Image: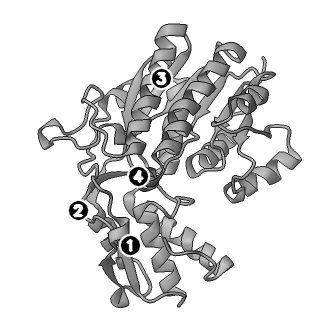
């Protein structure tokens, strides 16, 4: 029996690196990771070491904004599975760089699928959209189901509407086996510090080590989020492509712990070694012009299809996130810019 081959775009990110590790530990698949030449390799240092001692992992270089590089990277490949995770994924950044966000997320997705249409036409393809496509949802439409109308609240969210629609178009028009997910907030170790909860954890770790004053800079604390652990998320993505995948289907996926951003901050402060010293202040630069502030998912469709449900508690996720930043601060000191 031929060994399955899976492509992960965005393998250097939080989700991509965790997904690669999950597949190594739970399958015998070969893993191919698509990397930009300028991407940090820190999240995949373990994978690089594994690749040096095994033929199960290798890396190829390409840039979603350069169709020729994508074609060259994929032209001699024939994948069984594709996880398209690469994106400009920071909503706040998208307000200052909307065109880059559209280019990477919309045109980049089109470039990937157009290339796969020729090189890997039988692949099962996961296109990662986002819960941000729903944007500002009225309370009466929660929990959010798959048929909820889109009301994107940032250029990032608009770009993910494009990603979502392009994936389904390639399934309907060309018969590609594309499945689309709208994952709600997922976090944990390796989460970028441009995201609220990771920024809080990073600042707490810096304050604990004495590298900054015990004042945490925050944005909108009233936004309501449903939190999942990244390690539960990648398990969901594995089930997505292996449990009777249906071309053109789309799923909301998310956790079961709903909390305000303020609640996340308060929990992280409560588990800090200097909790009594910590305070916070609103930083105007951290506020979005508008915000997707009521993120409550219905995951019934995905649960019914795959049986997936979250296993890692909110408390465990936050503890691991804070410990991740403590380890980084211990290793690098105050070399981080506080964002």
Separation of marks 3 and 2 at Cα, in angstroms:
33 Å
Mark 3 or 4, closer to the camera:
4
Relative to 309, is 77 on the left or the right?
right
Mark 4 or 2, closer to the camera:
4
Q: Residue at x 38, y 84 (%)?
A: 215
Residue at the limit of the structure toward the left, as seen here: 140
Q: Residue at x 57, y 59 (%)?
A: 190
Separation of marks 4 and 1 at Cα, in angstroms:
28 Å
Q: Position of residue 253 (x, y in %)?
A: 38, 37
Q: Is residue 270 above or below residue 305?
A: below
Tell me, for residue 166, which label it has, or none. Answer: 3
Q: Residue at x 31, y 39 (%)?
A: 152
The residue where tag 1 is placed is: 268
The 10 Å Cα crowd at callout 1, few under 14, some 14 to 19, many 20 or more, is many
The 10 Å Cα crowd at callout 4, few under 14, some 14 to 19, many 20 or more, is some
Q: Earlier in the sequence, mark 3 or mark 1?
A: 3
Q: Residue at x 45, y 17 (%)?
A: 248
């Amino acid at each position: 029996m031929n060994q399955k081959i899976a492509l992960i775009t965005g393998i250097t990110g939080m989700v991509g690196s965790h997904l690669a590790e999950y597949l190594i530990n739970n399958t015998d698949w070969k893993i191919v990771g698509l990397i930009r030449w300028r991407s940090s390799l820190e999240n995949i240092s373990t994978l690089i070491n594994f690749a040096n001692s095994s033929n199960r992992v290798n890396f190829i270089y390409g840039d979603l904004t350069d169709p020729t590089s994508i074609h060259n990277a994929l032209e001699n490949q024939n994948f069984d599975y594709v996880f398209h995770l690469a994106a400009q994924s920071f909503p706040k950044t998208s307000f200052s760089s909307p065109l880059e966000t559209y280019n990477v997320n919309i045109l980049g997705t089109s470039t990937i699928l157009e290339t796969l249409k020729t090189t890997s036409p039988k692949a099962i393809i996961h296109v990662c959209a986002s819960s941000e496509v729903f944007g500002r949802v009225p309370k009466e439409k929660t929990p959010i189901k798959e048929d909820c109308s889109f009301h994107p609240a940032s250029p990032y969210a608009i770009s993910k509407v494009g990603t979502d629609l392009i994936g389904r178009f390639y399934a309907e028009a060309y018969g590609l086996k594309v499945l689309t997910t709208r994952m709600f907030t997922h976090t944990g170790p390796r989460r970028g510090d441009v995201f609220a909860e990771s920024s809080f954890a990073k600042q707490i770790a810096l304050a604990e080590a004495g590298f900054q004053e015990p004042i945490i800079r925050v944005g909108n604390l009233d936004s309501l989020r449903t939190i999942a652990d990244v390690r539960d998320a990648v398990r969901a993505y594995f089930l997505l492509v292996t449990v009777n995948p249906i071309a053109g289907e789309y799923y909301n996926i998310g956790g079961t712990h709903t909390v305000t951003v303020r609640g996340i901050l308060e929990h992280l402060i409560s588990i800090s070694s200097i909790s009594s010293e910590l305070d916070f202040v609103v930083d105007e630069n951290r506020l979005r012009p508008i915000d997707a502030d009521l993120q409550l998912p219905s995951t019934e469709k995905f649960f019914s299809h795959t049986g997936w449900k979250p296993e890692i508690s909110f408390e465990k996720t936050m503890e691991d996130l804070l410990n991740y930043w403590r380890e980084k601060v211990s290793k690098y000191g105050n070399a981080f810019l506080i964002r």
